[in-house]
Image: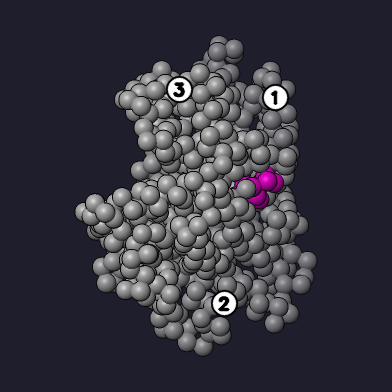
């Protein structure tokens, strides 16, 4: 929307400087006190044969009389433009008001498809904290791209294949009654899974039976093994779905590793036909050192000596399948940084095959989720922490906070759920994703810190002002926009929201949006202490109410994109 102000400035700059218009880029000044838009004059220094500050001063003099809705000052090598506050207020509030819940979005992605592989837990185990970050970051990336008009395809690449399921099947055969599998399948499976891993390592007979079971599974035979495996998959997916529902998250496609089973042979053939495979100690590999020096010692293994395929083979099959089906603009893999090597290898295989879409495949990696003091997160009983239990714990705490702060609140359970989940989600998205996240219950639930609950609280506070105005019949006069003279920073921030959404999606960095929202919440809270909204002269109240309403819309839209609920009261 700043376009409306930036365009005439660029026209004038082009006319006065002789630079082609498309080379004139207006930036955000380092300090908002300097102005709203800046133009660095370095590029002009050469052609004008003068020092940048002199060029800036000269240009400022010649631009000043012709600018409408803006003023200009030269500061060192920069031209700084300040948009007329009245025009800014009217433009921003009208634009936000008109677009409403669609503000921030666009249709620039129309006709393009983004594939996002996220969450992707493994069956036979409950979803654990390791998958939280992928789930939360991935879902945010889906929403961000969707808001920009892209067709998004969220895929859950469930880990449902591999030799370990041979062992699991044998463990089910032997010990299903011991662990009470029918009564609590999710817990029972976890126990059997752990026991089977131990048994494979220590019990020769068990191992032989496990290998035979996996061979049967791979053979595709419809028998006991496949039936058990299918049952495990169904039970596990049902468990995951309950968690996704709670988080308000959906995948478009659930395609586990097993889905790619029929495509494995064609995939191996495709890579072989490209002439990039070789046989090394009986295994089929792709050497990668030629396209990526760092991978000289780590070729990509497609088929082991015993004929079985691997995680990488299934991921390659998945990639070809996705490319053939979607011709994606980007294919994002939201997976922890510990799988860096794996995705680097996949990309290197594509590079060796000289596939020009290789750059469209991106590993969106992220750091660890750790407990206070950087320890591994564990459940209260010291076991693997299950995501659902973690959510329960935070929601329970949120409930206590709400009970203390607002005992009269209606719908307390719903709000506690929203605040607890909001706290977890925001904590995960508030810093650059590659950094580790520390999970500290008190911290993430604080209503004052850089937290989800702080955003939710600020949003509810703005909503309360609007509600009160409605009850008292205030805010219906024609607004006097001049009272927003002092609100430039908030208005400018609101105007930049669409750029932030675009940039967060382009960089796969939801934290850009988190930082923006915290900034907006801080600004509007500060503004509220200096600017009374209700009970002022009616045109003043009307103008300030306009700012409150539209700031709330921007907050709500941003929170929505990140995956935070925004209750109207809390
Ligand atoms: N199931 C894997 C794990 O838990 C993650 C899968 C990520 N996606 C993929 N296409 N490799 O480690």
Residue for badge 3: 277
Q: Is mark 2 within 8 Å of ligand 1?
A: no
**Picture layout, residue 163 above or below residue 242:** above
Which of 564 and 386 lies nearest the eye of the viewer?
Answer: 386
Q: Please give the name of the residue rendered at 48% of the width and 76% of the height, measured from the top-left corner.
A: 416
Give the x, y percent position of residue 419. Answer: 48, 71
**What residue does disc 2 label?**
569
Q: Is residue 23 left or right of residue 525?
A: right
Which sits earlier in the primary sequence, circle 1 or circle 3?
Answer: 1
Q: Position of residue 43 (x, y in %)?
A: 56, 20
Mark nearer the N terminus (3 vs 2): 3
Numbered disc in front, either 1 or 3: 3
Q: Nearer the viewer, residue 149 or 454?
A: 149
- The residue drawn where x is 57% and y is 24% is 355
Q: Position of residue 243 (x, y in %)?
A: 50, 66
The single residue placed furthest to the bottom in the displayed view is 408
Q: Residues within 10 Å of mark 2 (few under 14, many from 20)?
A: some
Q: Residue at x 66, y 19 (%)?
A: 19
Q: Position of residue 299 (x, y in %)?
A: 37, 27
Residue 146 falls within the magenta-colored stretch: yes
Residue 276 horizontal side relative to residue 494, left or right: left
Q: Looking at the picture, does residue 405 appear above or below residue 328?
A: below
- Mark 1–mark 3 contact, CB under 8 Å? no
Residue ID for mark 1? 21
Disc 3 from disc 2: Cα separation: 61 Å
The stretch drawn in magenta includes residue 56: no
* Residue 262 image-quadrant placement: top right
Q: Looking at the image, can residue 521 be seen?
A: no
Alpha carbon separation for disc pair 1 and 3: 50 Å
Name which residue lies at 64% across and 47% down.
152
């Amino acid at each position: 929307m700043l376009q409306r102000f930036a365009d005439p400035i660029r026209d004038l700059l082009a006319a006065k400087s002789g630079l082609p218009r498309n080379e004139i880029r207006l930036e955000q000044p380092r300090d908002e006190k300097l102005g709203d838009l800046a133009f660095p004059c370095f590029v002009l220094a050469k052609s004008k044969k003068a020092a940048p500050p002199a060029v800036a001063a000269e240009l400022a003099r010649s631009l000043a009389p012709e600018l409408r809705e803006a003023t200009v000052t030269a500061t060192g090598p920069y031209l700084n433009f300040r948009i007329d506050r009245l025009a800014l207020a009217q433009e921003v509030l009208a634009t936000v008001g008109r677009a409403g819940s669609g503000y921030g979005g666009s249709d620039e992605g129309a006709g393009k498809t983004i594939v996002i592989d996220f969450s992707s837990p493994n069956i036979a185990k409950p979803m654990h904290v390791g998958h939280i970050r992928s789930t939360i970051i991935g879902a945010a990336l889906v929403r961000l791209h969707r808001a920009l008009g892209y067709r998004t395809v969220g895929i859950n690449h469930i880990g449902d294949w591999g030799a370990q399921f041979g062992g699991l099947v044998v463990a089910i055969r032997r010990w299903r009654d011991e662990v009470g599998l029918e009564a609590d399948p999710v817990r029972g499976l976890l126990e059997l899974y752990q026991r089977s891993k131990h048994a494979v390592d220590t019990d020769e007979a068990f191992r032989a039976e496990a290998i035979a079971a996996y061979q049967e599974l791979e053979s595709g035979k419809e028998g006991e093994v496949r039936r058990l495996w299918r049952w495990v998959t169904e039970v596990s997916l049902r468990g995951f779905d309950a968690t996704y529902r709670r988080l308000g998250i959906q995948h478009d496609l659930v395609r586990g590793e097993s889905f790619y089973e029929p495509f494995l042979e064609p995939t191996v053939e495709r890579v072989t036909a490209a002439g990039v495979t070789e046989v090394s100690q009986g295994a089929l590999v792709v050497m990668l050192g030629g396209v990526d020096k760092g991978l000289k010692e780590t070729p990509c293994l497609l088929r082991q000596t015993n004929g079985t395929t691997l995680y990488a083979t299934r991921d390659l099959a998945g990639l070809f399948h996705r490319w053939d089906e979607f011709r994606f603009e980007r294919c994002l893999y939201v997976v922890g940084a510990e799988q860096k090597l794996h995705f680097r290898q996949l990309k290197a295989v594509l590079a060796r095959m000289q596939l020009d879409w290789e750059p469209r495949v991106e590993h969106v990696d992220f750091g660890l989720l750790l407990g206070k003091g950087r320890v591994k997160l564990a459940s209260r009983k010291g076991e693997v922490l299950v995501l659902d239990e973690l959510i329960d714990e935070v929601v329970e705490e949120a409930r206590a906070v709400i009970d203390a702060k607002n005992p009269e609140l209606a719908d307390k359970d719903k709000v506690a759920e929203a605040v607890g989940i909001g706290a977890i989600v925001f904590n995960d998205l508030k810093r650059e994703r590659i950094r580790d996240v520390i999970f500290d219950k008190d911290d993430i639930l604080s209503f004052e810190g850089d937290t989800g609950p702080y955003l939710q609280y600020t949003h509810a506070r703005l909503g309360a002002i609007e509600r009160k105005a409605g009850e008292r019949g205030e805010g219906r006069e024609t607004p006097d926009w001049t009272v927003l003279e002092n609100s430039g920073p908030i208005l400018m921030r609101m105007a930049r929201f669409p750029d932030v959404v675009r940039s967060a999606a382009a960089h796969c960095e939801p934290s850009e949006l988190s930082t923006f929202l915290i900034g907006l919440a801080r600004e509007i809270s500060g503004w509220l202490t200096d600017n009374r909204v209700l009970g002022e002269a009616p045109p003043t109240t009307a103008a300030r109410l306009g700012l409150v309403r539209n700031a709330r819309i921007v907050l709500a839209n941003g929170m929505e994109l990140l995956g935070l609920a925004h209750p109207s009261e809390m």
